[in-house]
Amino acid sequence: MTTDPDARSTLSAQSTSSVEQATVEAVSQLEAATDLEAVAALEHKFLSRRGWFAEAKSRIGALDPADRAAVGRSLNDARSQLEAAVKAARARLSASLSEDLYAAERLDLTERLPLKVPLSRGRIHPVTAARYRLEDVFVGMGYSVEEGPEVESAWYNFEALNIPDWHPARGSFDTIFVNLGEPEEVMLRSHTSPVQIRTMENRKPPIYMVAPGRTFRTDTADATHLPAFNQIEGLAIDRNITLGDLAGTINTFVGELFGRDVKTRLRPSYFPFTEPSAEFDISRPDGSWLELGGCGMVHPNVLRSCGIDPEIWQGFAFGFGIDRLAVMRHEIDDIREFVNNDVRFLSQF
Ligand code: PHE
């Protein structure tokens, strides 16, 4: 039997009621914990191998044998309460952690501007508007609108257009090549002419088509150039087509676009895919001429590349820049304005 007074006091500290009191205290500390680190620290303090519970248990042997069982039961009870309190505190704090995250990342998609602030509608970009206008004019003349890929092979961008790989004209297109397959085999199209080839390959003549779309060259952007710009290509394939039909067609769509008093003229030029080739100009009110694009009679080699017999079918083609056209039409002095995306500029149109 223990008679040592110090041992007695230890024993009394380890009575059932002192265990219960310590447990209540520990549980309320866990309930008050405000973050997961605090919970981990409390768990360590109460439940680790050197913690309160382990230490109390190690002292059971020093108790009056009559008390051991009761204190042991209350210690076990204390442990389950503490474990449950740790678990509950973890659950509470990690739930509020994700709630905080949700709250911080929440987007209010129902948000509305106060009604007194007038909502302004977006607008169609001037280059897109020019493209739509051109499509409308050509559809009105019986042409279909065709599209093709922006990444092309050498066949469509050059070869089928009568520009074999030794041809000096290849260099003049300042092509942006894509690092895929054989060198200089895959590229961003440098003009919309590949779409004529795709259309002729897939359709039987007669063909009347336009192909608007983005084109790319290694040009550095300046007041009159963009490395990514827009062209529209026209192609007509039929029987007995002549240069007169080409000149008349150009005159008709320019009249539709700019008004009947604007005149057009052709000047001899060179393109590998047309023969003869010309540049076409439009008249300005002051009597001077402005170059708009290139055109010509489709070269027989181009027709043959697409399986069309040049003895039966002839055609003309033309192409010009849509951005350039929009620049002229709105008298814009720097073509880069079209890609700066400054709403103050764009909202003028
Ligand atoms: N593809 C030519 C270019 O980009 C334009 C053109 C089209 C010329 C059709 C003649 C016929 O320069």
Image: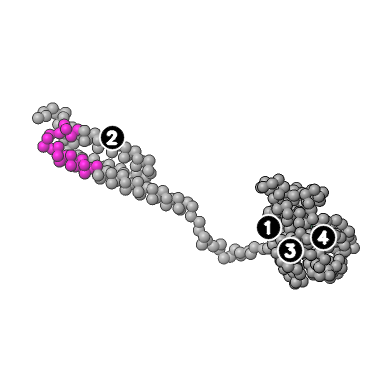
Residue drawn at x 85%, y 67% is 242
Q: Nearer the viewer, mark 4 or mark 1?
A: 4
Query: For this view, does 220 lie left or right of residue 72?
Result: right
Query: Image quadrant of residue 66?
Result: top left
Say whether mark 3 is within 8 Å of ligand 1: no
User: Which residues lie in the magenta part?
Assistant: 59-79
Q: Amino acid at mark 2?
A: Arg
Q: Quadrant of the N terminus?
A: top left
Q: Which residue is mark 1?
A: 149
The magenta stretch spans residue 66: yes
Viewer-proximal residue among 154 and 90: 154
Percent of width and height locating residue 273: 81, 58
Q: Nearer the viewer, mark 1 or mark 2?
A: 1
Query: Image quadrant of residue 286?
Result: bottom right
Q: Amino acid at mark 4?
A: His
Q: How far apart, in angstroms, are the residues tagged by discs 1 and 2?
A: 70 Å
- Please say whether residue 255 is visible from this viewpoint: no
**Secondary element at image label 3:** helix
Q: Amino acid at mark 1?
A: Pro
Viewer-proximal residue among 41 and 272: 272
- Please say whether residue 178 is visible from this viewpoint: yes
Q: Which residue is mark 2?
A: 49
Q: How far apart, in angstroms, are the residues tagged by discs 1 and 3?
A: 15 Å
Q: Which residue is mark 3?
A: 200
Q: Are marks 3 and 4 in contact (CB under 8 Å)?
A: no
Q: Nearer the viewer, mark 1 or mark 3?
A: 3
Q: Which residue is mark 4?
A: 299
Q: Are marks 3 and 2 in contact (CB under 8 Å)?
A: no
In this view, the residue farthest toward the left is 1
Percent of width and height locating residue 174: 77, 49
